[in-house]
Image (cartoon, helix red, strand yellow):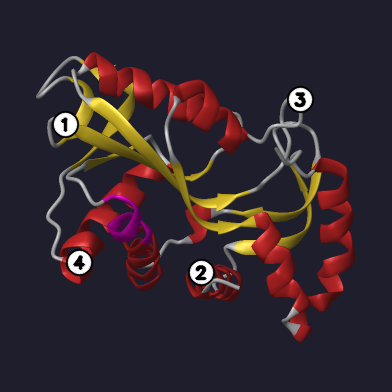
Amino acid sequence: MPDTEHDFLTFAIDSGVLGFGEFTLKSGRISPYFLNAGLFNTGHMLSRLGRFYAAVLAEAETEDFMLFGPAYKGIALAAATAAALYQDHDRNVGFAYNRKESKDHGEGGAVVGAKLSGRVVIIDDVITAGTAIRESVGIIRAAGAEPAAVLVALDREEKVSEDGRSAVAQVREELGLPVHVIARFNTLIEHLRHTPDLAQHLETMEAYRARYGESQP
């Protein structure tokens, strides 16, 4: 089991951010687990979270880039990751985020933060339908910048299309963007298998994977 994935999953579970039970998704499916990134709501948790995002980016993206966080959860993620990239990897990157509605006073506009330019990595918690990612790509391109990649905390590895593709696979194929992830659903199942205190959730998680797991290419 990859150390980064294992460590992140332990952190998310211990923090109460990744929970088990019955959760109704936007799709109407009843999921036996749910990652609520909004619960990373203290300075300590946000600092640790940013380090996980930064570690993945530092390895995956060797060229220069800046960060874009889709409102609302992506805002804190972009800020925390930019700070961790500087502190842990000596990479000083800019970050920006969008407003849900454009502002017609003050600095105005729909984008706050660094000017969108060059290669831009979109950062979020998960990809569900890919709507926020597509909107972000439009904003970035409209500014004359280049969407370079997407980074999310968890790949649910769950089919969302009739041909069995996951939301992450759709973004990769339809938008032509690499999608980096901190952890994956299949790794989460292996994590439960090797964690006695969580083994009671294994059966429902495996049943969910059997029903909704993405088709392998």
Classify mark 3: residues with Cα within 10 Å, few (<14), some (14-19) or many (20+). few
For the image, the number of numbered tags is 4
Mark 1 residue element: loop
> Mark 3 or mark 4, which has the lower sequence index?
4
> Mark 3, mark 4: which one is toward the viewer?
3
Q: Which residue is mark 3?
A: 163
> Mark 3 or mark 1, which has the lower sequence index?
1
Q: Quadrant of residue 70?
A: top left
Asked if marks 3 and 2 touch (Cβ < 8 Å), the reply is no
| Three-letter code for the amino acid on which mark 4 is drawn | His
Q: Is residue 12 left or right of residue 195?
A: left
Mark 2 residue element: helix
Q: Magenta segment, which residues?
A: 56-61
Classify mark 1: residues with Cα within 10 Å, few (<14), some (14-19) or many (20+). some
Quadrant of the frame with the N terminus = bottom right
Q: CA distance from mark 3 to mark 2?
A: 30 Å
Residue beneath the point at 74% across and 40% down:
214
Mark 3 residue element: loop
> Mark 1 or mark 4, which has the lower sequence index?
4
Q: Is residue 191 visible?
A: yes
Q: Which residue is mark 1?
A: 118
Q: Which residue is mark 4?
A: 89
Asked if marks 4 and 2 touch (Cβ < 8 Å), the reply is no
Residue beneath the point at 33% across and 43% down:
75
Q: CA distance from mark 1 to mark 2?
A: 30 Å
Q: CA distance from mark 3 to mark 1?
A: 34 Å
| Three-letter code for the amino acid on which mark 3 is drawn | Asp
The image position of residue 146, as x and y in percent, is 25, 26
> Mark 1 or mark 2, which has the lower sequence index?
2
Q: CA distance from mark 4 to mark 2?
A: 18 Å
Work out whether residue 163 or residue 192 is closer to the camera in this orientation and state it.
163
